[in-house]
Image (cartoon, rainbow, N blue to C red):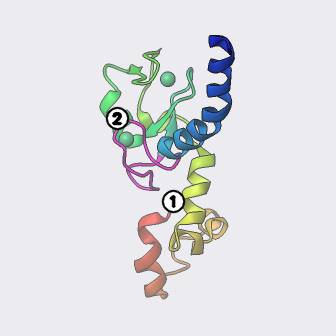
Amino acid sequence: MRSRQEEALEEVKTETPMKIRADYEERGLDSCHFCGLRFNVGERIPRIIIGCGHTFCTSCLSYFLRNGRIRCPMCRKLLKSVESVDKLPLNFNILYEIVTKDPLLSRVNFERCLNADPDMYGDDEAYERDFAPYMC
Ligand SMILES: [Zn+2]
Ligand SMILES: [Zn+2]
């Protein structure tokens, strides 16, 4: 006869890997935990709430921002003196994931974008039309 503890241990052993995997998929690192929408490089750019490290999309963060404070909806930690959500650091790991997974964005040369002279692509209309919304 096995003890309850042994049974519990057995359960943990068999169930844990599955749970972790499901959890990981559910967590969907590429989507915002609050609105459930996928991050993008526009209004749902992923930003980190400094102080607790949770990441949400900029659109949700601007909604949380009240009187210069942001209350993290995950851990309830209060972040004070937030001038604007634009001041919060971007989550580059997620951003990188989005950019490399997006067939259109992965074609954008961000290096070029950073060094770009705004008139450089003036005569390349197709490039402008496709990529202009993503330009910094
Ligand atoms: Zn969101
Ligand atoms: Zn938090």
Q: Which residues are magenta?
A: 29-45
Q: Which residue is mark 1?
A: 136
Front-most of residues 21 and 124: 21
In the picture provided, is 80 more to the left or to the right than 113?
Answer: left
Image quadrant assignment for residue 113: bottom right
Q: Position of residue 26 (x, y in %)?
A: 47, 43
Q: Is residue 134 magenta?
A: no
In the picture provided, is 110 more to the left or to the right than 85?
Answer: right
Please state, as top left, top right, bottom left or bottom right, where the N terminus lies in the image: top right
What is the spatial separation of the Cα atoms under label 1 and label 2, in whole angstroms? 20 Å
> Relative to residue 83, is residue 92 depicted above or below?
below
Callout 2 secondary element: helix
Q: Earlier in the sequence, mark 1 or mark 2?
A: 2
Q: Nearer the viewer, mark 1 or mark 2?
A: 2
* Circle on res. 62: 2
In the picture provided, is 30 more to the left or to the right than 2?
Answer: left
